[in-house]
Image: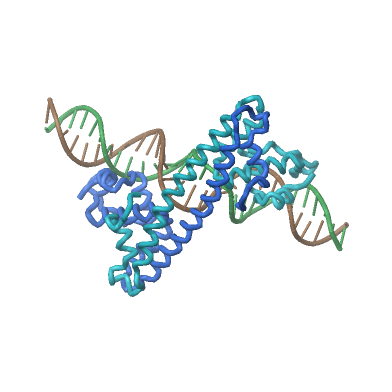
Chain colours: A cyan, B blue, C green, D brown
Amino acid sequence: MFSIGELSRRTKVKVPTIRYYEEMGLLAEAERTSGNQRRYDKAGLERLSFIRHARDLGFSIEAILSLIELQDHPDRSCETATDIAVSQLSDVREKIKRLKLLEKELTRISKGCDGLGVSEDCYVLASLADHEHCENEH
Amino acid sequence: MFSIGELSRRTKVKVPTIRYYEEMGLLAEAERTSGNQRRYDKAGLERLSFIRHARDLGFSIEAILSLIELQDHPDRSCETATDIAVSQLSDVREKIKRLKLLEKELTRISKGCDGLGVSEDCYVLASLADHEHCENEH
DNA sequence: TCTTGAACCTCTAGTCACTAGAGATTGTAG
DNA sequence: CTACAATCTCTAGTGACTAGAGGTTCAAGA
């Protein structure tokens, strides 16, 4: 059994975030000492690692809740879990696509400027003001 | 002179968002009719287009405020504007890098599942629980 | 001129996923 | 036994909006 601080150290999840996850129902309510402090065991550590990993992968709290519910009802099909992962994947791909367009435009914008003064028609500001300069939609 | 709704239509920025931008100091306080409704002209339209474009590119409200301040003091060097754009660009590149790693892992995860049931050791859940499965850091 | 109803106004509260701080209590090392 | 770090609960703040309540104004048609 270890404290919330120890759990935090082991999982790299901040203490207030752990309490927040508990409040959100991602973590079961922890056991308490006689003095009301939370104590955790291996199971708690594993569940928090799961949550942390899923958050790192960009899953929302809500999606993680579904995943956890699934874990707690192993009779159900795994399809839902796959669906959640697949939808997450398409989200990620969409984001990559958008960001690449932005990268292209930002590269163009930040290259164009000679640093001589805004009055000399700064390319950065002009580019942002005028969408016509863009080579792609966004 | 046109109304906030018309401005919204032309810039594709929602009405409450326009009011929010005004409150945040991104837009100057609009002129008002005798009945207290906002009226805008070409200058307002251009500034809002600028803001919208910058937001689309992922610039924060704060960054946009700096950019606007720069526009209002054309005596200053353009370097700051370039700096802001360059830092935005490196943010974007960092995000792309991270997302590509996630894409890889999510692809691996969502391929592994046969949909036969969570009890059969669902690959999605197992992968999320155990970081060791990852082929890369994150 | 009057009426209708869409568009406008302000204000407060909610969203997501935390983060920060106050003020009180508990656990533990020396 | 004493310090003091760590914990507790609670409230409020973050960013960039979004939603809703309840009231007012504008503009077009009769």
Query: Along the line of sight, which residue is nearer the eye, A101 or C14?
Result: A101
> Residue A67 vs residue D14: left or right?
right
Question: Residue A25: which quarter of the image?
Answer: top right
Location of residue B98 in the rendering, given as x and y in whole percent from the top left corner:
53, 53
Location of residue A104 in the rendering, given as x and y in whole percent from the top left corner:
39, 57
Location of residue A74 in the rendering, given as x and y in whole percent from the top left corner:
66, 28
Instruction: Look at 67% across and 33% down and name the residue there.
Output: B121
> Residue B36 vs residue B97: left or right?
left
Question: Residue B81: which quarter of the image?
Answer: bottom left
Question: Residue B26: which quarter of the image?
Answer: bottom left
Query: Along the line of sight, which residue is nearer the eye, B53 or A82?
Result: A82
Instruction: Look at 39% across and 63% down and name the residue there.
Output: B66
* Residue B36 visible in the shown view: no
Query: Along the line of sight, which residue is nearer the eye, B126 or D29?
Result: B126
Residue A110, compared with residue D9, is above or below; it is below
How many marks the image carries: the answer is 0
Query: Along the line of sight, which residue is nearer the eye, B88 or B103?
Result: B103
Location of residue B3 in the rendering, given as x and y in whole percent from the top left corner:
24, 46
